[in-house]
């Protein structure tokens, strides 16, 4: 598995966890796993930490985030509306993250 695919897996895992729980809890849970994975593969941990940070902020797929719940009922939104709008936005953030993180924070240690 190449390092970029590993970053993608960490991103998807973090996004999946940030849907039913808070962003901070998802980041706190995945960050040690990501850092340990990078260390064991001989890679710099900073790009993995930044990927977790960006992915934890992508809780666009469900209205379970407290700020989304505030507009869910009064706005007349359905659960599916969050998926329709949130999936493309999450994919865009994922692509930009996977393209830019290795450029700004190189994967190979110094």
Image (spheres, rainbow, N blue to C red):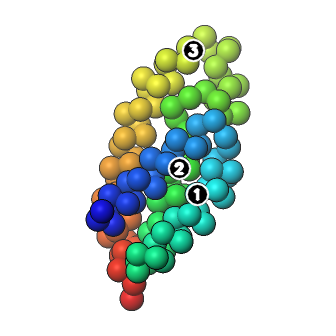
Q: In this view, does 58 lie to the left or right of 22?
A: left
| Sequence order check, earlier mark of 2 and 1 | 2
What residue is at 49 percent from the left and 19 percent from the top?
81
Please state which of residues 27 and 72 is positioned toward the viewer in this rendering: 27
Q: Which mark is residue 65?
A: none
Q: Which mark is residue 30?
A: 1
Locate residue 102: give its quadrant: bottom left
Residue 53 in the image: state x and y as whole percent.
54, 58
Residue 57 in the image: state x and y as whole percent.
55, 48
Badge 2 marks a residue whose secondary structure is: helix
| Sequence order check, earlier mark of 1 and 3 | 1
Query: Looking at the picture, does residue 94 appear above or below residue 4?
Result: above
What residue is at 39 percent from the left and 60 percent from the top?
7
Which residue bears the numbered disc 2? 14
Q: In this view, does 20 lie to the left or right of 10?
A: right
Residue 27 in the image: state x and y as whole percent.
61, 55
Which residue bears the numbered disc 3? 77
Q: In this view, does 44 lie to the left or right of 26?
A: left
Badge 3 marks a residue whose secondary structure is: loop
Q: Do the residues labelled 2 and 1 touch (CB within 8 Å)?
A: yes
Query: Looking at the picture, does residue 1 appear above or below residue 38?
Result: above
Q: How far apart are marks 2 and 1 (CA)?
A: 6 Å
């Amino acid at each position: 598995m190449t390092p970029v695919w590993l970053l993608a897996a960490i991103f998807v895992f973090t996004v999946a966890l940030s849907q039913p729980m808070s962003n901070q809890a998802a980041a706190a849970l995945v960050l040690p796993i990501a850092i340990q994975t990078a260390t064991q593969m001989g890679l710099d941990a900073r790009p993995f930490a930044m990927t977790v940070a960006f992915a934890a902020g992508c809780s666009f797929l469900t209205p379970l985030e407290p700020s989304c719940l505030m507009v869910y009922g009064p706005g007349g939104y359905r659960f599916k509306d969050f998926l329709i709008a949130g999936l493309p936005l999450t994919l865009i953030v994922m692509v930009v993250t996977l393209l830019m993180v290795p450029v700004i924070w190189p994967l190979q240690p110094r």
